[in-house]
Amino acid sequence: MPSHHHRPESEVALRVKAIESLLVEKGIVDLAALDAIIDTYEHKVGPHIGAQIVAKAWVDPEFKKRLLADGTGAISELGFTGFSSEHMVVVENTPEVHNLIVCTLCSCYPWAILGLPPTWYKSFAYRSRAVIEPRKVLQEFGLEIPEQVEVRVWDSNADLRYLVLPERPDGAEGWSEEDLATLVTRNAMIGAAKVQPPAAADSLVA
Amino acid sequence: MTAQDARVLLAKGLSCQVDSNLPAKFQVGDHVKAKVIHPKTYTRLPRYIRGKVGTIVKDHGVYVFPDTMGQRLSTKPQHVYSVRFTAQELWGLDASPKDSLYIDLFDDHLEAL
Amino acid sequence: MNGPHDLGGMHSMGPIPIEENEPVFHSEWEAKVFAMSFATFVNYFPVDETRHASERMPPGEYLSSSYYERWLYALELLLAEHNLVTPDEIEARIAEFTQADSLID
């Protein structure tokens, strides 16, 4: 294999273009398939899907019960399935327990529910540190976890994919499922953030 | 791969679960030890878990075994469990006594205590 | 294998690189590498074989490469090992493209 050391971007881009043209020429892949794959992850799937699942669990206690008992089954009730989300486990954050998801060996992540992972999730820093010093990692995200709260780290090394069900914030009583979903962030569904109350969310935007 | 093949794979994914009545080697509540192994081939048992003692918290059912799949060998279906390790078991007494690590391990990764 | 990918607990990896409002892909080539790898997942290589291929990258290189550079390495390695696209074919195609570009200039 040729060395991949510190090649300029233009060189990598040219190499990728060469491989693409060979794959297409040999009939291994159609350009339209590549476009469909890229379009799906750029425009169709993303954290808005996970946010709908979380909001439904907040307003529907029976759904929440099913979601925590059988993530895959409950999520498929909403029609959300897909690649790298075939087997889902949902873990609930409470005043007593804070859950954090990582994949130390690669960067496994529920693509169909949250989209492709952010750079920080794929970083060597996160993959190495989340398991040995989760509280320090969470501090870097601005989250101070009180000593008496249990931190549970989930290393998603196998074929199960994880989603954190964050705590419902105060100040959104009586909100519709649709409005609640707008409060739920990607990081909150990985365990790297809490869902902010609506006023705080507004002031962040302002 | 055609665009249609891509859409099907994107929407349906690839199930790794196997319909099987293969008995489980371990039960919820069992204390287990992660094997000490250093294969030169593919494994989903990370180094920081090897040799450590944990507790089975859930049996997820029977799945294909990635350690053999990654080498294009047999699917070798077996049970996969959610196993809890205390942070202190993994990292020593400097770790928080409250904290724990959950990881999914297969029958072949584990031995009874 | 005891490779560079097995990072749990390793020290000195620095602060978490948190990027605000990041795009799904940072360049077109990243998107293409992702899509080409995805397109081979079923028909050619099981996903675990692709994961293993990136782990086989020499440790020094693995730890100095970006996420999609590692995917590219895995893709090239498997295409070669399965005789789908050889390294020579890739180099020849790059040379063709470079020559075509220089003719336009």
Image (spheres, helix red, strand yellow):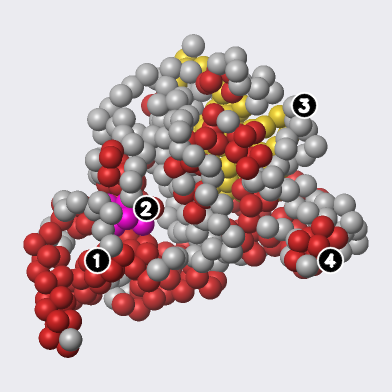
Do the residues bearing badges 2 and 4 touch, measured as CB atoms within 8 Å? no
Q: Tell me what residue is drawn at x 46 percent, y 74 percent.
A: A39
Q: Earlier in the sequence, mark 4 or mark 3?
A: 3
Determine the residue located farthest toward the front in the rendered image: C105
Q: Is any part of residue A31 visible from this angle?
A: yes
Which residues fall within the magenta stretch? C68-74
Mark 2 vs mark 4: in front: 2
Answer left or right for A47 relative to B52: right
Which disc, if any, is residue C66?
Answer: 2
In the structure shown, which secondary structural element does the residue marked by tag 1 occupy?
Answer: helix
Q: Earlier in the sequence, mark 1 or mark 3?
A: 1
Q: Amino acid at mark 4?
A: Ser
Q: Are marks 1 and 3 on the same chain?
A: yes
> Eyeballing the image, is A67 above or below B50?
below
Q: Tell me what residue is drawn at x 15 percent, y 75 percent.
A: C98
Which disc, if any, is residue A176?
Answer: 4
Disc 4 packing (10 Å; few <14; some 14–19; many ≥20)? few
Mark 4 vs mark 1: in front: 1
Identify the subunit bearing mark 4: A
Mark 4 vs mark 3: in front: 3
Disc 1 packing (10 Å; few <14; some 14–19; many ≥20)? few
Which disc, if any, is residue A148?
Answer: 3
Q: Amino acid at mark 3?
A: Gln
